[in-house]
Amino acid sequence: MSDQLSNAQPQFLTVGEGEAAREIAMLVRPAQAGNGAPALVWLSGYRSDMSGTKAVELDGLAAELGLACIRLDYSGHGLSGGSFGDGTISRWLEEALAVIRHVAPERVILVGSSMGGWIALRLAQELARQGGPKLAGMVLIAPAPDFTSELIEPNLKAKERKSLAERGYFEERSQYSPEPNIYTRALIEDGRENRVLDGIIETGCPVHILQGMKDADVPHAHAMKLVEHLPADDVVLTFIRDGDHRLSRPGDIALLVSAVKGIIRSSTNRQMPA
């Protein structure tokens, strides 16, 4: 499996026009001939990229099962161009949608981690509205929909509000990197325009949520709130009692693989004639 993964070469897709144009890096694993199962699409979290543990493990699962797998780096992340400071949910959503449309699979399973869970939910809305690949299922790992308005804005300190007003951003120490997290006014304002927890979310597909109960970034109550907004879907919520936000330990990865396989089986059964 490691040889298959190491030989992958990134492709680049230009998204946007003029000054807004940026080169988006993607890794696309084609399906084995005759395999009609849905393509797996990896959607990373904030400041994460397509070379992370969970992304690589998902690609490895695709290789094992002969499935297509699509990974991408949002602008300002990983191998992609563009400035991180210009990033917004709308901008990163546009890039994910452009990559999916470029590869053009017939069906997809969206696998989103943290902020990637938010982008997955917005992708479901946009694919339903604009047309495109059929959504066969979702696996959301510590999903953080609406995190700017639900988790950041209510907890802003006075000095952070002042920094946003005067400098257009504020910094926050990261436990995952020596570099601080940067949250811009544009990201927060755009986040309000991309809210999904303000009504019923209809994905039209099965959803499996994996959530750590010791997640210091996204409280497990947030996952429960998301479930309340998915009343029409077949939703499974798995709590990992000692799980953190990353959910990258071997046991966590095993749960992820199991969840994805379950969605694949479900999509296959739904495709079979009655």
Image (cartoon, rainbow, N blue to C red):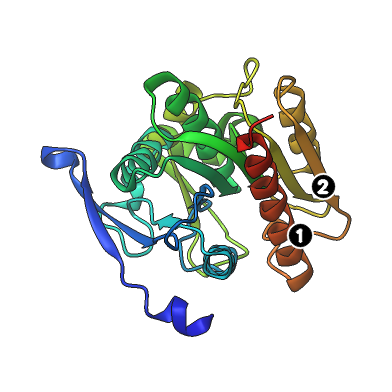
Q: Nearer the viewer, residue 156 or 215?
A: 215
Q: Secondary structure at mark 2?
A: strand
- Furthest-right residue in this view: 241
Residue 136 falls in image quadrant: top right
Q: Which residue is mark 1?
A: 255
Characterize the local packing of mark 2: few (<14), some (14-19) or many (20 or more) Cα atoms within 10 angstroms. Answer: some
What amino acid is labelled 1 in the image?
Leu
Residue drawn where x is 37% and y is 22% of the image:
130
- Furthest-bottom residue in this view: 3
Q: Which residue is mark 2?
A: 238
Mark 2–mark 1 distance (CA, rounded to whole Å): 9 Å
Instruction: Reply above or below: 264 against 248.
Output: above
- Quadrant position of the N terminus in the picture: bottom right
Left or right, residue 260 beside residue 254: left
Residue drawn where x is 24% and y is 58% of the image:
12
In the image, residue 35 lies at what x, y percent?
A: 49, 55
Q: Secondary structure at mark 1?
A: helix
Left or right, residue 67 beside residue 186: right
Is residue 196 at least partly visible in the picture?
A: yes
- Furthest-top residue in this view: 199
Whether residues under marks 2 and 1 lie with C-beta atoms below 8 angstroms apart, the answer is yes
In the image, residue 72 lies at what x, y percent?
A: 39, 55
Q: Nearer the viewer, residue 223 or 98?
A: 98
What amino acid is labelled 2 in the image?
Thr
- Quadrant position of the C terminus in the picture: top right
